[in-house]
Each structure stands twice: as structure tokens, then as C-alpha cells.
Amino acid sequence: MYVETTEPLTPDEILQQLQALVQGDPDGIACLANAAAILFLHVPEISWVGFYLQRGEDLVLGPFQGKPACTRIGPGRGVCGTSFTRGETLVVEDVNRFPGHIACDAASRSEVVVPLRVGGRAIGVLDCDAPTVARFGAEERALFERAAGIVGSWLEASGASV
Ligand code: SME
């Protein structure tokens, strides 16, 4: 059961809350919206978190928390497009040193992007930005990969589309 708290949570506790939230309604957008909200609320020192979803060849902005962001990312463009095309997590210590990084927010300094898979097929990415260099390490990588796994498994199990 989801219990609202503003106390600092461990990664396991954040993921337990995410699991409880996604089971709340059989709608894919509602799932992604609350997933972004719970991560933004409980992962410290981040400035933006949300989803880009495959629409034709592009990735298009989905549910997120943070400042308004770029709405459309072309194939293989930026950190998000690169992660999606390669089908692998990208952890970028310093976005200014990532060729082709798309600066939606000039204050963003580091980023982690994880493919969102449903039944083995990538349908988008989970993207998170931070205002400090090297914010994301092995622990955060695991957290976001597990979060995308929870969302993707639920989308597959429920048959919800996004
Ligand atoms: N920086 C991303 C674009 C999305 S924003 O960070 C929200 C990229 O290079 O793909």
C-alpha cells in the first residue's frame, strides 16, 4: 500500500512505494505520471525526472516532474536518443562533455537515462537530470534501472499502452 511520506527513503523503500503506486490504476499514463512524481519526491539532488516515449522514429516527452523540457528528440539524438538506440543505460558524469547532449535546462550537469522495456521491447526511456557533476553512480543506476523495470513489468502485466 502506498503511504505518503516526505521522510528520506532508502532506494528499496522508494521502489516499494513505486510498486504500490503503479498498481493503483490500470492506465499507463497514470502509472508513468506517479512514477515520475515518486522519484522526484524522494531521490535527492535531482532537477528533472520523467519519460520520453517512442512515437514513430522520435522520442516524445511523456509524464515528468521538473521544468518544461524539449518535446521531441530525433533518432539517436542526445543522451536519451543514444540510450534508446543502443538499448542500454547511459550515466553521464558531465553533460558538457557528452557530444550531442541536448540542453533542455542550462543548469543540468549530469544525467542518467535508462531504456523503458515492455516484454523485452524498448518503448521509451526514463531520464533523470541533476544540477551537479557526477551525481549518478552505481547506486543511482541500479535504482533507475529497477524503477524502469517495475514500470515496464506492470505495463506488460496490465496490458496498458502509453
Ligand atoms: N538532456 C537530454 C534531453 C532531455 S532533458 O534532459 C529533460 C538528452 O540529451 O537527450
Image (tube, rainbow, N blue to C red):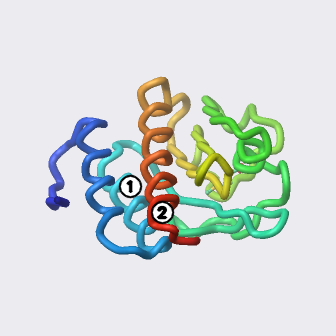
Q: How many marks?
A: 2
The CA span between labels 2 and 1 is: 8 Å
Q: Nearer the viewer, residue 151 or 101?
A: 151
Residue 78's spot in the image, x, y percent? 77, 48
* Quarter of the view holding residue 33: bottom left
Residue 145's spot in the image, x, y percent? 50, 39
Please indicate whether residue 17 sits to the left or right of residue 103 in the image: left
Please indicate whether residue 120 sits to the left or right of residue 142 in the image: right
Tell me what residue is drawn at x 55 percent, y 32 percent. Answer: 133
Compared to 125, does 144 lie above or below?
A: above
Tell me what residue is drawn at x 66 percent, y 58 percent. Answer: 123
Residue placed furthest toward the top: 138
Label 2 SS: strand
Residue at which label 1 appears: 40
Label 1 SS: helix
Amino acid marked by disc 1: Phe
Residue 146's spot in the image, x, y percent? 44, 40
Residue at which label 2 appears: 66
Tell me what residue is drawn at x 48 percent, y 24 percent. Answer: 138
* Quarter of the view holding residue 110: top right
Badge 2 local density, few (<14 within 10 Å), some, or many (20+)? Answer: some
Q: Nearer the viewer, residue 93 or 26?
A: 26
Among numbered discs 2 and 1, the one appearing first in the sequence: 1
The answer to whether marks 2 and 1 mark residues whose Cβ atoms lie closer than 8 Å is: yes
For the C terminus, which image quadrant?
A: bottom right
Which dot, 2 or 1, sits closer to the camera? 1
Residue 126's spot in the image, x, y percent? 56, 51
For the N terminus, which image quadrant?
A: bottom left
Amino acid marked by disc 2: Gly
Compared to 71, does 140 lie above or below?
A: above
* Quarter of the view holding residue 85: top right
